[in-house]
Amino acid sequence: MRKKIAAVFLVVSLCTGSQVLAQEHEQEHEHGHVHWGYTGHEGPEHWGGLAEPFSACKDGRNQSPIDIVPNLDADLSPLTITYIPGGSEIINNGHSIQVNYTAGSTLTLDGQVFELKQFHFHTPSENTINGESFPMEAHFVHADKDGNLAVLALMFKEGTANKELAKAWAQMPQAVGGQESLHQTVDAAALLPANQGYYRFNGSLTTPPCSEGVHWIVLKESAQASKEQIAQFSKVIGVPNNRPVQPVNARIVVE
Ligand SMILES: [Zn+2]
């Protein structure tokens, strides 16, 4: 009898043990801690199969990035951007270098207000424009009060050193997981070009879980960064961190 009870306890504790493991696994998925990258078995062509929550990476029909070839001329209204200086923190998340932004900067689309949360970089560019790739692309990520996302993309060409970028680059963490409070607050508005003509289309996150329903705005005019600034970023990330362009399918790309 004693033995039987012990056996029952053992079974119960084993079950509990595996449940805990399963939950931890779930949490890992929820928090996006499944390993993914830009090369080999964890590269973009495998993202959709790495974890169930990443299925949109292979099954989605409105994935980003794309090669932007506008197919509707719609006389778009000017962008409503109200940015205040707020780039306060720089992090190396292993996939990109990201500048976190304090509250109070907004982008308004069709009367809907999206707040700037962070901006980060890709090299080379993820989106291409009429087949043209750029050496670097910044993504300004905004969310509305319901969590809907709008990403403003800005291309960088190689040219003169970018003074606003330099404020962040001065404290770029070399190690994955590194995080620094910026000594000089970065002003996202100072990174934007004078001409804010843009392309607009629907897309997704360009990293797992590749969630769709993201409003994409890509500025037509590019900014400049020096060869050294671009190289500093690509050296820290170590690999090209651009997902290849995805099929446009039935999407309308407005200009
Ligand atoms: Zn991005």
Image (cartoon, helix red, strand yellow):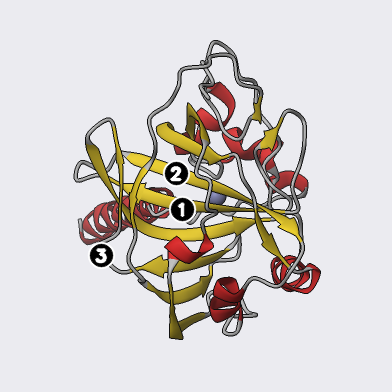
Horizontally, residue 183 falls left or right of residue 83, namely: right
Mark sitting earlier along the chain (2/1):
1
**Which residue is found at the position 19% from the left and 45% from the top?**
145
Q: Quadrant of residue 49?
A: top right
Is 33 rendered above or below residue 167? Answer: above
**Disc number placed over residue 151 in the picture, else none:** 2
Q: Nearer the viewer, residue 166 or 195?
A: 195
- Cβ of mark 3 under 8 Å from ligand 1: the answer is no
Mark sitting earlier along the chain (3/1):
3
- Cβ of mark 2 under 8 Å from ligand 1: the answer is yes
Is 31 rendered above or below residue 152? Answer: below
Mark 2 and mark 1 in contact? Answer it, CB < 8 Å.
Answer: yes
- Cβ of mark 1 under 8 Å from ligand 1: the answer is no
* Pointer 1 residue: 140
**Which residue is found at the position 49% from the left and 75% from the top?**
90
Question: What amino acid is found at the position of numbered circle 2 in the picture?
Answer: Val
Mark sitting earlier along the chain (2/3):
3
Question: What amino acid is found at the position of numbered circle 3 in the picture?
Answer: Ala
Mark 2 and mark 3 in contact? Answer it, CB < 8 Å.
Answer: no
Q: Report, in whole angstroms, how far the alpha carbon at label 2 lies from the one at label 3.
A: 16 Å
Q: Report, in whole angstroms, how far the alpha carbon at label 3 lies from the one at label 1.
A: 14 Å
* Pointer 3 residue: 103
**Which residue is found at the position 41% from the left and 68% from the top?**
100
At label 3, counting other C-alpha atoms closer than 10 Å, the crowd grade (few under 14, some 14-19, many 20 or more) is some
Looking at the rendering, in which quadrant would you find the N terminus?
bottom left
Question: What amino acid is found at the position of numbered circle 1 in the picture?
Answer: Phe
Is 86 rendered above or below residue 119? Answer: below
